[in-house]
Amino acid sequence: MKKIHPPRLFYNRFFWQFILAAFMLGMAFFFIRHEQLELVEIKNRFRELNIFYVLLGGILTFAYVLLQGQMYVESFKALGRSVTLQTSTHLFLRRNLVSIFLPAGGFSSLAFFSNNVESQDVSKSQVYLASTIYGICGIFSVVIVAIPVLFFALLKGQLQQAELLGFAFLIVLSISLLLTFFSLVKKGRIYKLIQKKFPEYGLVLSEFSSHQINIKHFVGTLLVSLVIELVGIAHLYIS
């Protein structure tokens, strides 16, 4: 039987970039049309703003973007690879824009825009691994910051059951991701299970586990992520 091959267009990167761009423009048009009254109200509110806090918020936003870029830098250093802050900041901005329109947000956007990084002598598997470190540290820092906040809310009696359950799920998710990550790197049980059940991924897993993780820079990634959380809190306060 003759095999049916997909059209060459399906393998064209520009084609998918065009589809994604058209989708984004369509979503932007829908948003402006749907939220027209709210946008007019925002315009009126801008006239009442305190310019000092607007400038302070702008400075914090700039710092936030640079910190996100630095978090990527530390993630790649954890693999023994050096990426410039400019390249990593561009990577964050592009992925952050795409994550608005994708399901699962930030995590699903980690597969996009790796060309500039790969041009700096970084393999595709290292890009994926560094992005995984970035994603795990991003979730883990939320848990670390949330613990004292939720404990304080618990003492004040301001915590609902739904919030406790959500936080418990976040802790379980963070620990699961961390254990899975190190199991793959150290060729542990999860690594062996995937090798057994899905042998077609053997080459990818072998390349994934061949990298040595620098714990110092892994912790550095987590510390930068914690600073990002604090900047976010300060930004909310300024707003």
Image (spheres, rainbow, N blue to C red):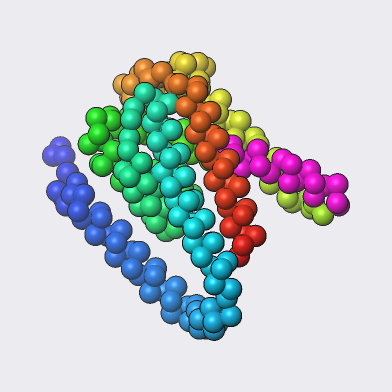
Q: Quadrant of residue 32?
A: bottom left
- Quadrant in which the N terminus is drawn: top left
Residue 206 lies left or right of residue 192; in this view the side is left
Residue 211 placement (x, y as % from top left): 38, 20
Q: Residue at x 50, y 16 (%)?
A: 188
Look at the picture and state if 12 lies above or below 35: above
Which residue occupies 56% across, 25% down? 179
Left or right position of 154 against 15: right
Q: Nearer the viewer, residue 198 or 39?
A: 39
Does 185 sit above or below residue 127?
above
Give the extent of the magenta segment: 139-157
Q: Is residue 127 visible?
A: yes
Rendered image quadrant of residue 115: top left
Instruction: Give whichever of 190, 98 is nearer the camera.
Output: 98
| Whether residue 190 is visible | no
- x%, y% of residue 5? 17, 44
Residue 213 appears left or right of 165: left
- Image quadrant in which the C terminus is located: bottom right
Magenta span contains residue 153: yes
Residue farthest to the front, as pictured: 52
Quick check: 87 above or below 192? below
Residue 209, image x and y in percent? 40, 19
Residue 234 lies in the magenta-colored region: no
- Give the camera-side residue of 83 and 9: 83
Query: Residue drawn at (29%, 38%), measured in percent from left and top?
Result: 117
Q: Main secondary structure of the magenta part?
A: helix
Q: Is residue 118 left or right of residue 145?
A: left
Look at 33% across and 45% down and name the residue there.
Answer: 86
Residue closest to the eye, 4 or 222: 222
